[in-house]
Amino acid sequence: MTHVLETGFEELNRENPNGSPAIRGYNIVDGELKSSSSGATFESRNPAWVDDCLGEFPLSTEEDVHAALKSARKAFPSWSSTPAPTRGQVIGNMGRLLMDYKEDLVRLQAREIGKTLKECGGEIQEAIDTCLFFQSEGRRLYGQTVNSELQDKELFTYRRALGVCGIINACNFPSAVPFWKMIPAIMCGNTCVWKSPQDSPMLSFALARIMHEAGLPNGVINLVHGNGSGAGQSLVDSADLGMVNKISFTGSTSVGKMIGEICGRNLVSASLELGGKNPLVVMPSADIDNAVEGAYWAAFGTAGQRCTSLGNLILHQDIYDEFMEKFMEMVENTRIGDSMRHEDVLYGSMLSEKYAIDFLKGVEICDSDGAKKMFGEGAITDDNRPTNFLGEASDGSYMWPHVYVDVTEEMSCFHEEIFGPLVTVVKAKSFDHALHLANASPFGLSSACYTNDRLEAYRFKTGIKAGMTGINNSTTGAEAHLPFGGVKDSGNGTRESGIWVIEAYSYWHAVNDELSGKLQLAQMDVEEIHIEEADADYSALA
């Protein structure tokens, strides 16, 4: 095998159909390449072509995670005292290097997780946008000057770094999401230990390599590979040992609740961006063609493997038949396949075999609930394939698009997040009924309403319990300068992206500077101002 740092990005993208690992990857701890202390490894394989093995990576142990945390702790004093504009310049360098390597990174990401080239291009661009946005925020890490109630005293506030941040993200957005987390974290002066997704270690290694090439000092970002129950659990459990000051996690609600419990009992800050069962409402006044296109993309883009993917499609009864006729025509003609070999496909493979297995369990929930299946036959095989599937089904893990109708809020499939190309359709009697249905699931991440009635649009965006809402737009899509996150079972209220994320990676430090040379006590030494009766006679104004 080839040492990963001895290769260029062109070689990293070279397909390896012989089944053996092409590249040997490593953890990065204090700027040095490290194998697992146990010697154990795992492989990264192309889910769209399972014979293509990208590389072999360390299956990190608790010892490896603790070494990374110690490295981050050692680097913290120097990095946090580096002027914020200088930290911002390093981040700007990262953005420019991402631009230089964008085409290679897009192909590497598409190869490692099966997303389409177009979607991977948008995601790498979002990482670039995040770097360029926070480069300038390094010059705007503002505090405030506050007027004192006492004389000869100045009051100030400053933003201070938290310390060491543990970063854990899922593989469905393996470049945008870790940059959402780590870029504002290091801009605020924190250091990080990043547990890469098990299904995208090669891309994570390439991104970490770019960060160091940009001038990032050793130890500021440390990368460890492995699985959630091993390296991920060790990183979270380090909160019990006082080794970490922050955990930022994107993933399932069940795991997020466990992380929140551990962080809570140790008074460790947690950012939890979790699942969704995102509703999309269509009202009679909507542009139906526009709504069909938005719902179709929201449901089946990325093979439905977004936390913001459409879950419950809520249709007003007056437009139900027209909408479903147009919607089903699009669904039945969906082009599916490996975008690295076929053009104009809507979606590719599942992210990995694990995601494929979990998705089929979600299909079983819909079937057992008694929902009516309009389209979808589970896994795509050579003998069971949609009309517009391109390529050999046996090469990877591909799924039919699924549509279930006659769904009610009493059914489990109405409430459960089903991570994959499946949408449940619910009929609404009125706007109030539609809004009720939109709020009826336990999640509150994203939402959408298609209507050209201004009052309905207003009532939806003020009545929905969600962190994000689209009006005449799909449930998916985020920009690097808007807050991203949810409520209810979709998160703990923290936000990714934009200036709002700075609150998650810094704390306010209040400074009281006494200039009088004597003790002055707030609230006690303040001169009382008495209310006096006015001398003037205002009776004539009555």
Image (cartoon, helix red, strand yellow):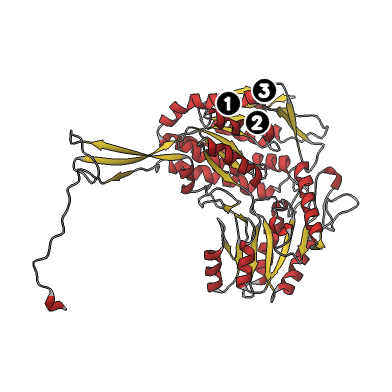
Q: Mark 2 belongs to which amino acid?
A: Ala
The image quadrant where one finds the C terminus is bottom left
Q: CA distance from mark 2 to mark 1?
A: 11 Å
Give the quarter of the image for residue 388.
bottom right
Residue assigned mark 3:
35
| Horizontal side, residue 453 vs residue 142: left or right | right
Position of residue 200 in the picture relative to residue 533 (left or right): right
Q: Position of residue 233 (x, y in %)?
A: 64, 33
Which residue in the protein does label 2 denote? Answer: 231
Q: CA distance from mark 2 to mark 3?
A: 13 Å
Q: Which residue: 71% across, 32% down?
A: 11
Where on the picture, by quarter, is residue 221?
A: top right
Identify the element where label 1 is drawn. Answer: helix
| 1 vs 3, front mark | 1
Of labels 1 and 3, earlier in sequence is: 3
Query: Is residue 250 positioned above or below 468 on the image?
Result: above
Which is nearer the eye, 157 or 218?
157
| Mark positioned earlier in the residue sequence (2 or 1) | 1
Establish if 211 lies above or below 325: above
Nearer to us: label 2 or label 3: 2
Q: Amino acid at mark 1?
A: Ala
Image quadrant in which the N terminus is located: top right
Q: Are marks 1 and 3 in contact (CB under 8 Å)?
A: no
Category of crowding for the residue at label 1, using alpha-carbon neighbours closer than 10 angstroms: few (below 14), some (14–19), many (at least 20): many
The mark nearer the N terminus, 2 or 3, is 3
Read off the residue under disc 1: 68
Q: CA distance from mark 1 to mark 3?
A: 12 Å
* Residue at 64% from the left image edge and 63% from the top image edge: 280
Residue 403 location (% of width, % of height):
77, 61
316 on left or right of 542: right
Going by the numbered disc 3, the residue's amino acid type is Ser
Q: Is residue 483 above or below residue 93?
A: below
